[in-house]
Amino acid sequence: MNYDTTGVRTVTRQAMSAEMLDAETELTLARAWRDDGCERSLHRLVNAYMRLAVSMASKYRRYGAPMPDLVQEASVGLMKAAEKFDPDRGVRFSTYAVWWIKASIQDYVMRNWSMVRTGSTSSQKALFFNLRRVRAKFEREAGAAGDKIDGQSLREKIAIEVGVPLRDVEMMDARLAGSDFSLNAQQAGEEGREWVETIEDDGPQAEHMVEHSRDMETARKWLTDAMVSLNARERMIIVERKLRDEPRTLESLGDELGLSKERIRQLEAQALKKMRRQLEGATGNGAAMLALA
């Protein structure tokens, strides 16, 4: 469901006018949904706490995310809470729902903060949502004491305060200090050259493709030559057991050839030994046998 600005106002009005549930009614609705799948009970429970979702969403507007999207994510978190809530644990639904609503909103904010992923571990989340607040706190304290705090000392204090490694603070600080830009923007001093042209292609390089093709052709010739050393039955077993996309079982080959599984296994080992000798004579090391491993 997508909310425009008018939609947010409508949802907010509806949330503020929704009923307030007492603990007993809340428990009854939660059990009706859990035990009987009563969707009317679920709808009533969720609507009653939509004001909580809207209120929490509004606290994240400073991160630049559109309010309609924040409300939508808060609603998703509220629905997840309703689905997983156990009314027999003695906890109010509002207390339980706060965690799910917050998690849903924070995940959305972090996913959309930058084209470059800012991270998703618990320590990275703690940093993302507390870095500016903690930094401002230490800067105020230093200013009040008439001291000047350098960047490295400030980051060390932040790491201790938030309880994360210093390297995480340094990395998050650098990411939040930067900004996204178009890959089609031209580089300074590079007339006509765009940033996208500097990105290395992570696909296979031409020389590697040619080398791989040549190696495969050589290995294919070695294997073809080695197959000549086998009799017809041995060739059939090697083809069916080693060269098919879906190798046949020892039992199925035994049934077809009128032999036991153990005899098929012996013939397979015998054939591979012949091929190995042939390849060692041709290549000096039998490297092509790797293809049959």
Image (cartoon, rainbow, N blue to C red):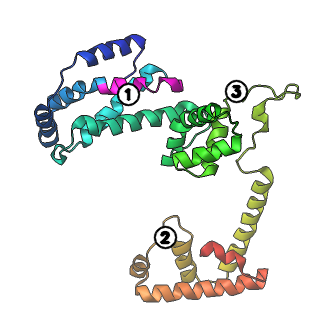
> First in sequence: mark 3 or mark 2?
3
Query: Disc 3 or disc 2, which is closer to the eye?
Result: 3
Residue 36 location (% of width, % of height):
11, 39
Residue 63 visible = yes
Q: Which mark is residue 182?
A: 3
Distance (Cα) linking label 1 and label 3: 32 Å
Q: Amino acid at mark 3?
A: Ser
Distance (Cα) linking label 3 and label 2: 50 Å
The answer to whether the residues at label 2 and label 1 have Cβ atoms under 8 Å apart is no
Q: Magenta-highlighted stretch: main secondary structure?
A: helix
Q: Which residue is mark 1?
A: 56
Q: Amino acid at mark 2?
A: Pro
Answer left or right for 166 relative to 128: right
Q: How packed is label 3: few (under 14 Cα within 10 Å), some, or many (20 or more)? A: few
Q: Nearer the viewer, residue 241 or 40?
A: 40
Relative vertical location of residue 24 with respect to residue 3 in this rendering, above or below: below
The number of callouts visible is: 3
Residue 268 lies within the magenta run: no
> First in sequence: mark 2 or mark 1?
1
